[in-house]
Image (cartoon, coloured by chain):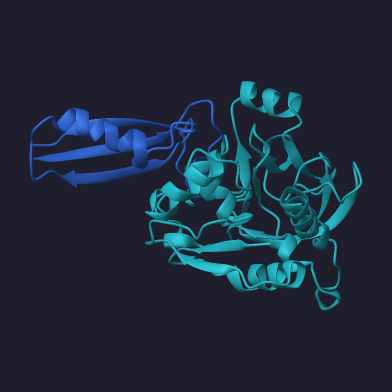
Chain colours: A cyan, B blue
Amino acid sequence: MKSAVILFPGTNRERDMIAALKKVTDAEPAIVWHAKTALPDGLDLIVLPGGFSYGDYLRAGAISARSPIMRDVVHRAEAGVPVLGVCNGFQALCEAGLLPGVLMRNASLKFVCREVRLEIVNAQTAFTHLYRPSQVIRCPVAHHDGNYFADEATLDRLEAESRVVFRYAQGSNPNGSQRDIAGIINEAGNVLGMMPHPEDLTDPLHGSTDGLALFQSIATTAQEKAA
Amino acid sequence: MKARIIVTLKQSVLDPQGQAIEGALAALGFDGVGSVRQGKIIDIELSDPADAETRLNAMCEKLLANTVIEDYRVEMVE
């Protein structure tokens, strides 16, 4: 499986992401600097990792979403290449218009860094099919702007179309997100954004490997496509 | 040519920062504050005044404001 990780100035969670991808795909992901205008050919996955691109200036993910490489990311996403945005990557995908809504400042106004219980609401996506429906996993969050907001009509539509993929399990919403939304997918089912960090639960030394199934889901989907 | 862009959260969007400011004002003894909403100001100096308003509005739509949650206003300063 061929993957690429996009680096923006201020991205800082790429190491964990690269380690998770290496572990699951047995291949080195391509690291692509934001100023490039083209991604490598034949990608099975594009990842926008977490961090504080451009210091969250203007709005979290706003500047990185308009950087040169994003034109090709949008182009590939429209062509069906799977795209995963985690944390700051989720914020950038929303700002780029690949996902609806926006991640606002946490309702508490505080940076939250802790483990939450995450419910797999849709276990039939290319990113989650190795989880059980309604399975609740452990997953860390670390963000200041994770408060998912969209208008009521958009929220209703996301729910009706099973596009809410992850929810903070009852009582564990760390940021005030509407309807406890932690991760959503686009209409075509190939662009997923989520605030929690599945890459940080991929090794027994992390204390849990609950995040592995996400990467394995993506890898098996890619294998099935190739076969 | 100078312009000032004022970006504020839409009325329908909760503004916890505004609420925190409101609480702090009350704590300082400022009475009679109904509500506080905060936003940002972006000053832009245009080197070419042609189609200024159209260009500034396009800048707001494309980058300066996220119209899912924010309203913007363009003021010509001079």
Residue B60 location (% of width, % of height):
32, 36
Residue name at image x 79 percent, y 67 percent:
A201
Q: Is residue B56 above or below residue B40?
A: above
Q: Is residue A149 above or below residue A214?
A: above
Query: Is A182 left, or right, of A95 in this rendering?
Result: right
Pick out the residue farthest to the top.
Answer: A153
What is the quadrant of the N terminus of chain A in the image?
A: bottom right
**Total numbered labels:** 0
Residue name at image x 63 percent, y 41 percent:
A148
Query: Is A208 left, or right, of A40 in this rendering?
Result: right
Q: Is residue B28 visible?
A: yes
* Quarter residue A103 falls in: top right
Q: Is residue A154 above or below residue A21?
A: above
Residue A180 location (% of width, % of height):
74, 40
Q: Is residue A50 visible?
A: no
Residue name at image x 80 percent, y 48 percent:
A128
Q: Nearer the viewer, residue A57 or A20?
A: A20
Pick out the residue farthest to the front.
Answer: A227
Residue B36 location (% of width, % of height):
46, 36
Residue name at image x 83 percent, y 78 percent:
A205
Query: Is A223 left, or right, of B5 in this rendering?
Result: right
* Quarter residue A139 falls in: bottom right
Q: Nearer the viewer, residue A77 or A56?
A: A77
Residue B12 location (% of width, % of height):
53, 26
